[in-house]
Amino acid sequence: MTLATKPPRVRRARRRGFGISTALGIGAGGLWLSVIVLLPIAALVASALGSGIGPFWDAITTESAISAFEVTFLTSAVVTVINAVVGLQIAWTLTRDDFPGRRFVDALIDLPFALPTIVASIVLLALYGATSPVGIHVQQTKYGVMVALLFVTLPFVVRSVQPVILELEKSVEEAAATLGARPFVITRSVILPALAPALLSGAGLAFSRAIGEFGSVVLIGGGIPRKTEVSSQYIRSLIEQDSPAAAAAVSVVLMVVSFVVLFVLRIVASRLARKEAPSDTFVA
């Protein structure tokens, strides 16, 4: 055996070791994912479709179910658009500007992550309920539901966009400004294309969280059937009425809609990210 033959064997051994560790990692991750995510989802689908397609369709097309879907999806879509705009502005300000209390505001953004949602509902009820100290009464209205959803979903957009803003090269913006580009043109041609993938991802997460939210809308929304009752509250009412199959059917609809939205936005964001190149060109 010559010395020249040893390096390939070493490399093969390293490849085999890397392959084994990778296989173990994939196996452990797949097992954990199956136990925590896939099996509960399978059980939910089995419960929803246990009696066949007919009962499943009947459960999700009742007048109460459709009304709950309308309230849920409409308010969630509006909230997502608002938070996409406001969240982008907040993330930009926190990242690019320096002002007194910036660190406090930055930490405050994460409060909805840590605060129990029922506590958020109590706070919002005290602020915007019948005895509102600011004179704004939105309890038991769709506006109250929107306020609650705005509160709990804002961090998803801000925290998704913030790291990308940190990585943006200011030199490109400065070069565009030096060449005479107006702020609107710089925002449209330089900043937004770079932020679009992260913004879409954050918006998708916010929408998915909004359609499944329960605790923060309980008190401020009131859960009035066919008016302010969201799908999560309707599911609870079905459970209380001893209709677990119908509750599972409505849950499957929410799960499918959430997955489709996340999947589509993930694909769009990936394509935008591939198209986006570190180019310093812009349209003047």
Image: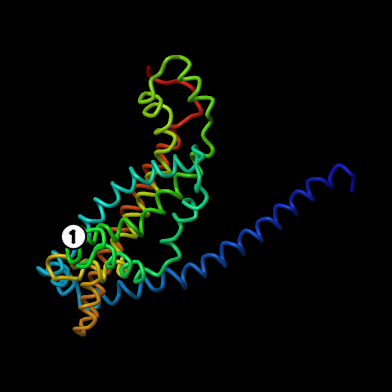
Q: Amino acid at mark 1?
A: Lys
Q: Nearer the viewer, residue 196 or 175?
A: 175
Kindly identify which residue carries mark 1: 142
Q: Secondary structure at mark 1?
A: helix
Q: From the viewer's side, name the closer residue of 189 and 277.
A: 189
- Residue extending farthest to the left is 63
Q: Residue at x 29, y 47 (%)?
A: 82
Check the image and tell me how it is coloured: rainbow
Nearer to us in this view, 104 or 227? 104
- Image position of 270 with respect to 145: above or below: above
Residue 244, horizontal then vertical, whole percent: 24, 80
At which x and y percent is residue 23? 61, 61
Determine whether, in the image, residue 99 is placed left or right of residue 284: right
Q: Quadrant of residue 128?
A: bottom left
| 52 lies above or below 8 | below
- Residue drawn 23% across and 75% down? 247
Q: Quadrant of residue 227?
A: bottom left
- Circle 1 packing at 10 Å, graded few (<14), some (14-19), many (20+), is many
- The structure residue drawn at horizontal position 35% and vertical position 47%, both measured from the top left corner, is 265
The answer to whether residue 68 is left or right of residue 86 is left
Q: Quadrant of the C terminus?
A: top left
Q: State left or right for residue 86 relative to residue 198.
A: left
